[in-house]
């Protein structure tokens, strides 16, 4: 006579164990997706911040160059 190794477990307990494993697997996959999504959003925001910094720096360089040109022209007109 062969003994069933799952004899102490009722069908409900086995189904509950399977449901728990499925739930934990689903939560693990969800966490991985959130990490990947969070990383993608983080990289996008870092890129956006870098581009904004470069644009503002370029604008300040242009403003400083324009101010230098205006000052130079005013000196020329004042000396002439």
Image (cartoon, rainbow, N blue to C red):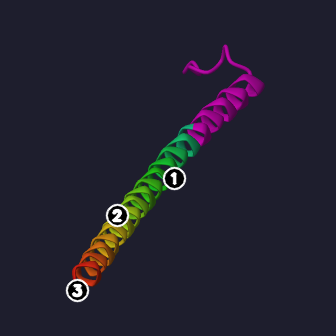
Foreground residue, 47 or 4? 47
Query: Which quadrant of the view contains residue 79?
Result: bottom left
Most common secondary structure along the magenta stretch? helix
Q: Tell me: residue 42, above or below residue 73.
A: above
Q: Report the span colored magenta.
A: 2-27
Secondary structure category for the residue under label 2: helix
Q: Which of marks 1 and 3 is in front?
A: 3
Foreground residue, 32 or 39? 39
Sequence order check: which comes first, mark 3 or mark 2? 2
Sequence order check: which comes first, mark 1 or mark 3? 1
Sequence order check: which comes first, mark 1 or mark 2? 1
Marks 1 & 2, CB-CB < 8 Å contact: no
Q: In which quarter of the image is the C terminus?
A: bottom left
Which residue is pictured at 65% across the width and 18% down the height?
A: 7
Query: Which quadrant of the view contains residue 68?
Result: bottom left
Marks 3 & 2, CB-CB < 8 Å contact: no
| Position in image of residue 12 (x %, y %) | 77, 26
Please name the residue that numbered disc 2 is placed on: 54
Please name the residue that numbered disc 3 is placed on: 80
Q: Residue 37 carries which label?
A: 1
């Amino acid at each position: 006579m062969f003994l069933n190794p799952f004899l102490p477990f009722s069908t409900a307990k086995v189904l509950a164990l399977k449901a728990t494993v499925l739930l934990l697997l689903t939560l693990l996959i969800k966490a991985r997706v959130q990490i990947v999504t969070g990383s993608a959003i983080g990289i996008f925001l870092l890129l956006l911040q870098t581009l904004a910094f470069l644009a503002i720096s370029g604008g300040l360089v242009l403003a400083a160059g324009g101010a230098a040109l205006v000052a130079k022209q005013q000196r020329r007109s004042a000396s002439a």
